[in-house]
Amino acid sequence: MPLDRRSFLGRSAATGAGVALTGAAAVPAAAAPDRGHGRPKPSKAKRYAFTVLGTTDLHGHVFNWDYFKDAEYSDAAGNAMGLARIATLVDEVREEKGRANTLLIDAGDTIQGTPLTYYYAKVDPITAEGGPVHPMAKAMNAIGYDAVALGNHEFNYGIETLRRFESQCDFPLLGANAVDARTLKPAFPPYFFKTLKAKGLPPVKVAVLGLTNPGIAIWDKAYVQGRLKFPGLEEQAAKWVPKLRSMGADVVVVSAHSGASGTSSYGDQLPYVENSAALVAQQVPGIDAILVGHAHQEIAELKVVNERTGRTVVLSEPLMWGERLTLFDFELVFDKGRWQVESVKASLRDARTAADDPRITRLLRKQHEAVVEYVNQVVGSATETLTTVDARYKDAPIIDLINKVQEDVVREALAGTEYADLPVLSQASPFSRTSEIPAGEVTIRDLSSLYVYDNTLVAKVMTGAQVRAYLEYSAEYYVQTPAGAAVDADKLTNAGNRPDYNYDYVSGVRYDIDVAQPAGSRIKNLTYGGAALDDAQRFVFAVNNYRANGGGAFPHVASATEVWSESTEIRTRIAEWVTARGTLDPADFASVDWRLTRDGVPVF
């Protein structure tokens, strides 16, 4: 699901401060002991310096363009994004360092996340006979990437699309812990070697190990079950790093699509940690640096001490979407017949300081324009403006639209089956805080901004008691706020750093969420059909595939009986629903199913 399927722990380290970790020994960059990276420098020793450049979580962002707003991208921090700007930054670094002294890698989540990537997966698919070259492959080939790790979102469109993308790339897609389900052998290249040569110096062998996220087994179960398995990062790094050293690697860099917080968003469904990059650094000897991905955080430099060797491993995460570029600057010394890493320093460069590379603009202009034309197609008209501005804490009609569409699709799909007479409930999340469907003409991009993920629809059977537990878990999203205390809407949500996409509305029942009560006892006045909910009653529950597979660790839903699913995106179903009616009128879908209260008194 969500571009942000993860929970975070820690704080930004953009200025070199440490990030708080769970289960890993981290030290602030400014105070970390060298523990081996910082030997006395022999005066006549042979030396060599090189730089590894890194991006992550590009999510289909080539240009500094917001397809949902049909305008230049902007955010509250004034960031800029896109591979076209990264290309300029990369050229600058190569000019400074010498291209022969650089590598360029990425930590995954490349081919999903924007209408651009959706278009070339579904509308004009790269898998079609004679189909186009994926714009991300075009851009990354032109920039000259050396290797890219697989992200979890690489699997969102199925393995066929991923394999076609792989065939179009001039660089390997790495995934040491993406293994064949039958043979347990790597299904993708585990590593990449590059030999750097400087005049008069022995060659330097740099190994890049790629690791992806074990959560793929949950989030894209429909595509990978029985075909691929995803063991934990720590165990696979422990297997491969010694092999790389035995193969002559002077330097080992890991490109890991896994955050640094040591946390997971999928509960106990897998025996692996989702955000384990720092744990890899702490537990596996022989790694010099880790390019971190997945968590969408900005970490300029984080130093983690390996518990077995006492050596320092340097981590860096360059935010996402091409907003930052990581630089790992290595200094090596040739000692006792081999190269030794003397020091590693990490830093970030900012896309705001760069202009678009005209090569990338020329290369992808036509594909970009095709997508702009597609998303601006008019599919209907709205009688009033619908927005997600307050959808986190008020039952908003715009989220009711998602639930109404899901209910209708599932009812139609189950007609004539043994489940046709069961009442249908539906869940949906307030993914965006800025989505808006304006009054008047409604376009595909308006509807796409409402549902930004490529989720598909699943129908499960759950009992009233399970629905109640589901709602209680969802209500943990709110910060406990006593009756009489001032209410600040901006501080009322995201308790425990729970992201908005892990808060669910449930339609078809009515309930209050009493935020004065502790988590676990907040759901009050839960009714169905005007009567108290019967814990034994069975319902069909319409859920997105992320939630159905266990994303967000909501109770009961992953293990519930599945009675139907499809491969059409929910976003597409919404567009079809609006197109069929022509008019988007809240009277056709809006209902007040829930409200926030404190000791029984409405908050709003």
Image (cartoon, rainbow, N blue to C red):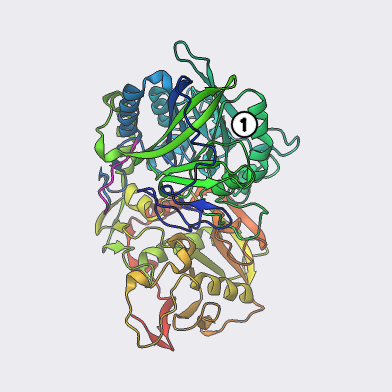
Residue 199 appears at what percent x and percent y? 44, 11
**Residue at image point 48% right, 67% down:** 496
Q: Position of residue 63 (x, y in %)?
A: 31, 36
Is residue 143 a member of the stretch shown in magenta?
no
User: Which one is nearer the viewer's eye here, 304 or 337?
Assistant: 337
Can see residue 1?
Answer: no
The percent coordinates of residue 75 (x first, y second) are 28, 51
Would you place residue 182 above or below residue 417 in this image?
A: above
The number of discs equals: 1
Q: Is residue 36 above or below residue 20?
A: above
Front residue of this view, candidates 210 and 137: 210
Left or right of 130 on screen, residue 458:
right
Report the magenta residues as a range.
76-82
The residue positioned 60% from the left and 53% from the top of the image is 565
Residue drawn where x is 32% and y is 26% of the image: 360
In which quarter of the view is residue 603 placed? bottom left
Residue flagged by tag 1: what amino acid is it?
Answer: Pro
Task: Please say if 448 is above or below 142.
Answer: below
Secondary structure under tag 1 reads loop
Residue on which disc 1 sits: 190
Q: What secondary structure is the magenta-colored segment mainly? A: loop
The percent position of residue 298, horizontal first and vertical second, equals 39, 48
Horizontal relation, residue 103 to residue 434: left or right: right
- Is residue 550 among what the camera can see? yes
